[in-house]
Amino acid sequence: MKNKSLKKLRVLFVEDEENIAKLLKNAIGDSFYSFTLASNGKEGIEKFLQISPDIVITDINMPHMSGLDMARELKKIDKSIPIIILSAFSEKEKLFEAIDVGVIKYFLKPYDPDEILDYISFISNEFEDKLVELSDDFNFNKTSKSLYKNSKFIALSKNEVKFFTLILNTEDNILDDKAIKREIWNEEVSDDRLRTFIKRLRVKTSKKLIINLKGVGYKIS
């Protein structure tokens, strides 16, 4: 039986050998919400910033930037991002270096795709509370504080990130006007300013996503 939680995960696979990248994607890619490919460490960082994946799988020896160098940069962006190394290297130095970087698993080539899938399935429970499914095909990543619609990244302002983080951590995802004003602006603001803020956020996202509860506040559906 397939682990349903895998279907919520976005995976980034960084591999310079195109045939290997396609083979792994064809073997296990359909098990996930998305499975994105990058051909080197530099492109891997660019894709990471675009899609904010839940897990990264990478080769070590690649042009432009190695997998370990990329992993160091990714850990600066998101300390919690799980990184799996796939490599033909068996030297202890590479293994120790990967451990120092914070890599959670090290598979030596040739590897079995099913073993990789089984391992990700094993650790997938850690992601259960990370990705929140919202209405109208939106998802919010609580760790990276990123919003997506159908895997497309939606850029949010600092205050908009605060709003989503705050309301998704409240009971029933409902927040009253006073709490929004206090937590987001930390100062006295008018009702008009709050309404304008919500209106702009709805334009950026969806009217179906943010619901106005008269006399109560706002709800994320």
Image (spheres, rainbow, N blue to C red):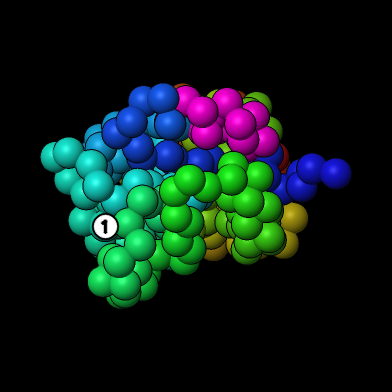
Q: Circle 1 is placed at which residue position?
A: 68
Q: Which corner quadrant of the image does residue 133 belong to?
A: top right
**93 sits to left or right of 83:** left
- Looking at the rendered structure, the number of numbered marks drawn on it comes to 1
| Disc 1 element | helix
Residue at screen point 44% across, 40% down: 12
* Quarter of the rendering occupied by the N terminus: top right
Q: Which corner quadrant of the image does residue 112 belong to?
A: top right
Nearest the viewer among 147 and 112 is 112
* Quarter of the rendering occupied by the C terminus: top right
Residue at screen point 35% across, 46% down: 59
**123 sits to left or right of 106:** right
Residue 28: percent from left, percent from top: 62, 35
Residue 35: percent from left, percent from top: 51, 33
Q: Which residues are magenta?
A: 21-35
Q: Residue furthest right?
A: 1
Q: Is residue 132 above or below residue 129?
A: above
Nearest the viewer among 124 and 50 is 124
How many other residues sit within 10 Å of disc 1, few (<14), some (14-19) or many (≥20)? many
Nearest the viewer among 70 and 138 is 70
Residue at screen point 71% across, 48% down: 5
Whether residue 5 appears in this view of the structure is yes
Nearest the viewer among 151 and 102 is 102
Whether residue 151 appears in this view of the structure is no
Residue 189: percent from left, percent from top: 38, 54
